[in-house]
Image (tube, rainbow, N blue to C red):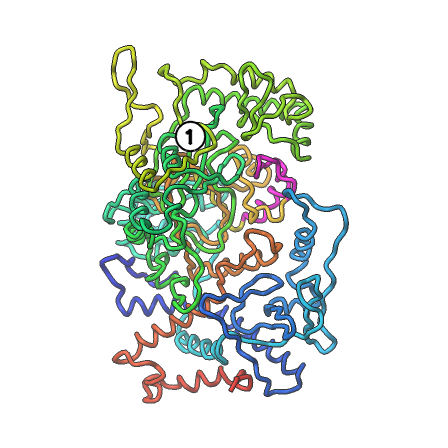
Amino acid sequence: MVGPNIQSLDKQQHLSNTDRIKLLKFLLSYVRPYLEQLHQDQCHELEMETKWRGDASTRVERSKLMKDERLYCDNCCTSMVDVYRSCPVCGYDLCLTCCHELRKGEQPGGEKAGSAEQQSHVRARGFGRILQNSWKLPLWSVNEDRSIPCPPSERGGCGSGTMVLRRILKADWIAKLVADVNYFLKSSPMPPVSCDNHELVCEHCVRMMKESAVAFDGLDGLLRRSAKRSNTKDNYLFCPTSQLIKKDGLEHFQRHWLLGEPVIVRNVFADTTGLSWEPLVMWRAFRETTKSKFESETTTIKALDCLDWSEVEISIRHFFTGYQEGRAYEDGWPEMLKLKHWPPSNSFEERLPRHGVEFFSALPFPEYTHPKQGVLNLASKLPDSVMKPDLGPKTYIAYGMREEIGRGDSITKLHCDMSDVVNILAHTTNVKLRKWQKRQVDKFQKLCKEMTLTKQDTEDAEHIQRGGPMAHASYLAVQPGTGDLEVSGMSIAADESNTALSPTWMNRLHKDTSNPEDMRLDNGLADRGCYGTDAVHHKDTLEEANLEMDEQFNTEVYLELPDDGRKTEDPFMKMEDNSVGGALWDIFRRQDVPKLQEYLKLHFREFRHTKECHLDHVIHPIHDQTIYLTEEHKRKLKEDFGIEPWTFEQQKGEAVLIPAGCPHQVRNLKSCIKVAMDFVSPENLQHCIHLTEEFRLLPKEHPAKEDKLEVKRMILYAANRAVRDLRHLTSPQNEQPSQTAANGSLPGYKVFAERHVSRMSEFVLG
């Protein structure tokens, strides 16, 4: 049994009470083990406090937090759920996990965290530079009576106080919640366990295959082949239409989801209002909601340059023009920009309300993905009285092109999200390379292959790693008649001592790129594209900038050819082609992560990141988000380690659901507008917790270190909300169980709850 076979929630249809009860119990069955473990850990720490104080009537003081206040462990940065320790002298806070590690004789955070912590403290300026002097954190251990002292000043504490217990929630709140959950699940079966066994296969697909007497290849339209692994049954991904899932319900999806497989849903906008996701439409809608405030946000934005991963400021007009027509550097190399989280606010619905409604209407499997009405989405259970994590929706707007050039590609690097994700491709524009640009890219790629075979290039690579100037073919603008190279906006002498390329290679590049006749369009017109890395053109007034942008998009752009007077469409204009996808996805199986990490640790020096410099070290090859596996690396990965990802092209109007714990990367084949939403499904709860523990071991300066999801706190509130809803749904005439228990309608309820609360009763603060 996978789960209750319930019809998928339609925007015009609500779940029946019977179906909702089944789904709520389904959620609680996954939550219960973690809730009981949390309760057990707190009871253990309370017993330790009693032994240390020698007083069974110890009172645990409650901390008073503001609505928008979060409490994190000062050692590992994990969010506090309820009971924790704090120094009464300096206020240093410590989570229970760190307390348990100290009592086991370990350094809190584990050996990996300790090592990473030391590295972070001795890191010099410049990425990856480590000081030569040895530095080590002082040891931290418990006292003879098993109490925990405040850490020394080198670790952020005062070193003088003894840490005492404090709590965030009301006394016995979790104990009562455990009793409530157990009561409603006392006759429920154990939930199915999420399994990453690649030998298993969806029973529904097998049955459909037998009924139609075809192989998996014959189930076209329902399954999409995304890998060519041998001796496995998971090369196909479930790929239904949005209309089919509304008809068939959740059960088929849940079988694939339990196997840890991504799911692709087609035509998600088929039953929505049809609101346009064109950049101009979005910009105008955004401008309407920000007329009297945030004026600067309607004229300029900060985008990410995919060549050197630097942040550039650019006017919205120029960014959206480049989205539709393409941009290039001064030497003609294609420029790829990305815009993350636009509009620049945590409230997508506030800045783009109509697009927010359109996105929520398009969400597949809303029982899982909807941020407010998703009955199986743990994130939807958080009350308004607590600060919520930013789970979206988030808009990603990026340039793209089909060719993989190896430098400056429009990509999202390999990473692993803390939660499940649904990503919808809302809009695409096809911008192709001009022929002369394609020739330049081909020459560069051929040159790079030749350089890797020479001893000179080995020395050049070492020079780059030592901090030499960033000089490579993709960003060189060789000025005819001079011996200078223009690199990233700076002019540097083109001599052997000041560049990362030898004179031999520079001469060849000069020959390849310095012919002005080659820098012309195929129709003989001079290239008038969006060149340059500047891009901010400030206007005297907001109205002037808005008017100019309106004129830009509302005017048909044609070029007058002098020979015959015919009007020809601008070769920079968008060329929509729906025969190919807009984004290329690579999603790795969870069971392949150890081998994937092993490969990345062996080859990380072959990858470039900020300022186009080779990586000289990695802390975590996936969580660092500094690596993108090219086609060549994916080929070597399969040859050397026998693993390959699911690889597929996402079409416009398709939603991709990625399970938590699956590393993935994306390359944009067209200019794309994607909208993503994080959610937390019951089946993948264990993987969310596992990732939280992995992030806990990262150094404090690591971008992924913060416990943004706070999944343990989410478990508490999800269980509490589910219990409250079940009380309402199962009580006669909507009476609460606590009321009906007194009348015998729910026999034994009060006795059942009191038995689970008794262990903590002596710690109640009067």
x, y percent for residue 633: 55, 35
- Picture quadrant where residue 459 is located: top right
Determine if residue 213 is in view: no
Residue 558 vs 176, above or below: the answer is above
Q: Residue furthest right?
A: 133
Magenta includes 593? yes
* Identity of the residue drawn at 56% across and 63% down: 78
Q: Looking at the picture, which amino acid does disc 1 mark? A: Arg
The reply, left or right, for residue 447 in relation to residue 539 is right
- The span shown in magenta is 592-617
Q: Quadrant of residue 224?
A: top left
Rendered location of residue 22, percent (x, y) = 34, 68
Residue toward you, 643 or 273 = 273
Query: Against 120, is 613 above or below?
Result: above
Residue at the image position 53 percent from the left and 27 percent from the top:
474
Residue 429 lies, in percent from the top left, at 34, 34
Which residue is labeled 1 in the image? 327
For this orientation, the residue located farthest to the bottom is 743
What residue lies at 66% left-to-right and 23% top-to-bottom?
454
Element under disc 1: strand
Instruction: Answer few, some or many: residues within 10 Å of disc 1's Cα (few below 14, many 20 plus, some between 14 and 19).
Output: many
Nearer-the-camera pick, 458 or 310 = 310
